[in-house]
Amino acid sequence: MRAVDKVLEKTEIATVANDPYISPTNGLGSWIWTSNTFNGQTCQLWRAFEIPEGSTVSKAWLVMTADNEFTLYLDGRKLGHGAEWHELFVFDLSKILFRGRHILAVEAINGASFAGMLFGLRIDLADGRIIEVKSDQRWRIVPEGIKRWEKTTEAQPDWPKATVIAPLGGLPWWTQPLNVDRMPSLLPIKVYFWQTGWFQITLLSVCGIVIFISLRLTAQLTMHRKERWLLQQERARIARDIHDDIGARMTQLVLRGELAQGELGDGSKTQLHLVQICEEARGLLSTMDEILWAVNPKRDTLRDFAAFVCNYAQEFLKPTPIQCLFELDPEMSAADFNLPLRRSLLMAIKETLNNAVKHSAATELRLQIQWQGEQLLVVVQDNGRGFDPAIIKAERHGMTSMAQRMAELGGSCLVTSQPGQGCRVAFAIPLKQPRRNLWSWSWNNKQFSGPADGTGNARAKKNSQNHDPTQC
């Protein structure tokens, strides 16, 4: 016992002579291996054991070695490796064993000559019972090529039993080891919630639902794009038909009317009727150009809208003494500006221009089209006679109609005027996609310059009155 005690004292395993864990050879079985032995051989040994339900492990020590090296697994978990058959390797399993079925697996390698594996596991339960697992014929030899055999919970019928090569201390092996190596303490593997099965199943389910919804939305988006493409094609066809058929016929009608005028005498009633018919036809052609612009899908951009509005204002004000000035975003976006928005906004601008010509007596009109935040702002401002929004009827100037159009688009219409200080009408329409404000405008505080005597500056300092026609 003294030689053994010195070995154990050196390795700090135990110091009490009557402790069953003092001698590492206590509880060891026999040297076991497969029935055939050869150099470079790999032997896979498997054994299952159970800790009774309701039991608590108070202490568990595993002692083993192999000629020539081994790798130890418990329930598929790699516990350690040894490569010296003259020594014993001690594992403390007290903190990782619990009640239930457990699987021991040893992958041993024979370098040359003799081969064997020596094993002993002692488990002390809290109620005083002891469970021992030794190297004996109850171990099974797992054939090569079996996958995940170290985690298999049941032995297959074709797995042969281990062969006892020699008892403990039998030749050619030792009776006492040269050294006892205490392996690092083993602790339970901490399983985080994201590593649990229920979390992974839930995550996979959520991912599956997200993928399904994404595919469904993608399919709907594809269908929507196809429908939009078909609609654009139909709009283009209608625009071509109007231009090529109705437009050509209206032009021919005007030409025939003018030809008929030349064949009649001057001043006849028939000639006057023909003149009126030709004028109405020309007006219809002008209206048809506007309809073609609205229907044509190639004009569904902000840039085209701004160009059309400026061109319309210039042509509309040409016969009048009103000078038209334009202030546009120098980098007007080519983003889509769909038909309902641009059609309603165009009608509101036309109503404003018409009111300016009929009622303002202005000499100057300024048209501003710009971005402001996520809104498109269109401002029509004149230097005419102005009016008091509190006393004048909104119906007279079509303000109610303009406000309704903007409200339907989710926008606003703000009328600012005061007698003798002109009128300012601002239309604001929110756009779906935010854009960067490319130009910093300060026109909110600008006023048209007045006469050279400075009365214009005096008027600019007065407080103007604001009127929201939606409140009329």
Image (cartoon, rainbow, N blue to C red):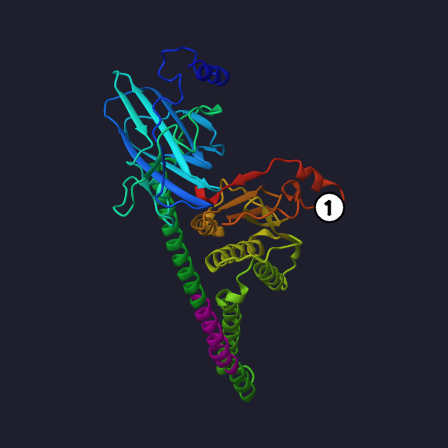
The local secondary structure at tag 1 comes to loop
Q: Nearer the viewer, residue 39 or 408?
A: 39
Q: Is residue 241 magenta?
A: yes
Percent x, y of residue 222: 42, 60
Q: Nearer the viewer, residue 191 or 222?
A: 191
Side of 178 relative to 18 (left or right)? right
Q: Nearer the viewer, residue 320 or 171?
A: 171
- From the viewer's perspective, is residue 170 above or below residue 427? above
Side of 451 relative to 24 (left or right)? right
Percent x, y of residue 82: 47, 33
Residue of label 1? 451
Q: Is residue 407 magenta?
A: no
Q: Is residue 232 visible?
A: yes
Image quarter (top left, top right, bottom left or bottom right) of the C terminus: top left
Which range is magenta?
231-252
Percent x, y of residue 277: 49, 77
Image quarter (top left, top right, bottom left or bottom right) of the N terminus: top left
Q: Is residue 472 visible?
A: no
Percent x, y of residue 221: 42, 57
- From the viewer's perspective, is residue 178 above or below residue 464? above
What amino acid does circle 1 point to?
A: Pro
Outermost right residue: 452
Give the overall secondary structure of the magenta segment.
Answer: helix
